[in-house]
């Protein structure tokens, strides 16, 4: 009886350790990219976030950048919501009983058109920010953030 209790305890302990070891390895990894992702563009739809670390921003530059970020976020919010709606509709069309390829194709065209708009808005936003910066600030902006962003896409 005592042996069974010890064996049961050992099995439970081993199971517990195995379960928790998976949780430990599932944690987010921080690597060399982690620094720029934290300080620059953590999400691809937020390129203006990098402005928080640009050296020597004047109060006027910061205000203009903040205004640009608000405008950018409003535009992206609408496009992201439309894109999510279209993605959900595509999934519904693809998994329905009577699949119509013409509807699937039209929805895919809608999604890619939205992605196209988002890319153009992102590019315009980055250029708007760059136009507010002096040469030293532009170099920082271009090297610390946009190169990292391009690698992730």
Image (tube, rainbow, N blue to C red):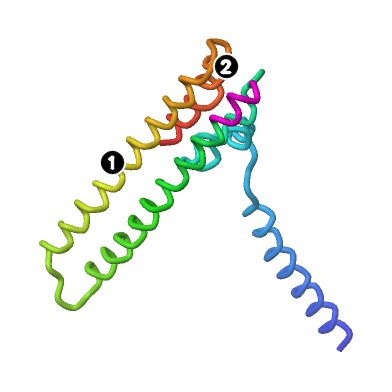
* Position of the C terminus by quadrant: top left
- Residue at horizontal 47%, vertical 21%? 130
Q: Which residues are magenta?
A: 58-64
* Badge 1: residue crowd in 10 Å (few <14, some 14–19, many ≥20): few
Closer to us: 95 or 76? 76
Task: Give how far apart the Cα atoms at labels 1 and 2 are.
Answer: 28 Å
Q: Which secondary structure is most common in the magenta stretch?
A: helix
In this figure, which residue is indicated by the disc labeled 1?
116
* Badge 2: residue crowd in 10 Å (few <14, some 14–19, many ≥20): some
Residue that sits furthest to the top in the current view = 135
* In this rendering, the label closer to the viewer, 1 or 2: 2
The quadrant where residue 20 appears:
bottom right
Q: Position of residue 74 (x, y in %)?
A: 45, 48
* Position of the N terminus by quadrant: bottom right
Closer to us: 90 or 97? 90
The quadrant where residue 3 appears:
bottom right
Element under disc 1: helix
In this figure, which residue is indicated by the disc labeled 2?
137
- Between discs 1 and 2, the one toward the N terminus: 1
């Amino acid at each position: 009886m005592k042996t069974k209790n010890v064996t049961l305890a050992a099995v439970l302990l081993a199971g517990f350790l195995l379960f928790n070891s998976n949780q430990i390895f599932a944690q987010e990894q921080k690597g060399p990219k982690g620094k720029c992702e934290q300080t620059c563009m953590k999400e691809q739809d937020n390129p203006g976030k990098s402005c928080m670390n640009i050296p020597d921003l004047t109060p006027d530059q910061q205000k203009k950048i903040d205004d640009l970020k608000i405008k950018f976020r409003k535009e992206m919010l609408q496009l992201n919501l439309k894109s999510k709606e279209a993605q959900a509709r595509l999934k519904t069309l693809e998994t329905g009983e009577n699949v119509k390829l013409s509807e699937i194709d039209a929805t895919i065209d809608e999604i890619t058109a939205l992605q196209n708009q988002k890319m153009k808005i992102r590019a315009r936003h980055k250029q708007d920010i760059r136009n507010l910066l002096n040469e030293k600030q532009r170099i920082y902006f271009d090297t610390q953030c946009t190169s990292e962003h391009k690698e992730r896409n």
